[in-house]
Amino acid sequence: MNNKVTHVDNDSFKADVLDSAIPVVVDFWAPWCGPCRMVGPVIEELAEEYEGKVRFVKLNTDEAREIAIKYGIMSIPTLKIFKGGEVADSISGAAPKEYFKEWIDKVLV
């Protein structure tokens, strides 16, 4: 994994996501989830393309259950975009890279 995608947990979520000066895409995932593993490389590519404009982080729902529950994660993968500490939008499931790009661009405007 490249260093453009950060792993966050219960301790780092507030600083890395809620207090971020730029929008943050949080990939709620788990290592045992097949579709999550399909989304992982796409997230890494997007992190390269949006460097400096959007931050990308992964949150293992098995290790950070409190956060997953707080944000109503019912299925994984779920991606949420946070702007100014608030959820701006959310999508669930694996999808092609272009779908994620359209979703991110819509929230950035």
Image (spheres, rainbow, N blue to C red):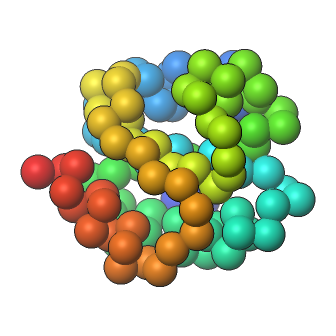
The residue depicted at 22 percent of the width and 61 percent of the height is 105
Decide which of 108, 93 is in the foreground and name it: 93
In this view, the residue farthest toward the left is: 109
For the N terminus, the image quarter is bottom right
Q: Where residue 20 appears, x then y in whole percent? A: 38, 30
Q: Is residue 15 visible?
A: yes
Q: Is residue 48 visible?
A: no
Q: Where residue 57 appears, x then y in whole percent? A: 56, 47
Residue 11 as seen in the image, left or right of residue 55 = right
Q: Quadrant of the rendered structure where residue 71 is?
A: top right
Residue 7 as seen in the image, left or right of residue 63 = left
The residue depicted at 32 percent of the width and 69 percent of the height is 101
Decide which of 60, 51 is in the foreground and name it: 60
Q: Where residue 88 appears, x then y in whole percent? A: 30, 36
- Give the vertical position of 96 relative to 68 (above or below): below
In this view, the residue farthest toward the right is: 32
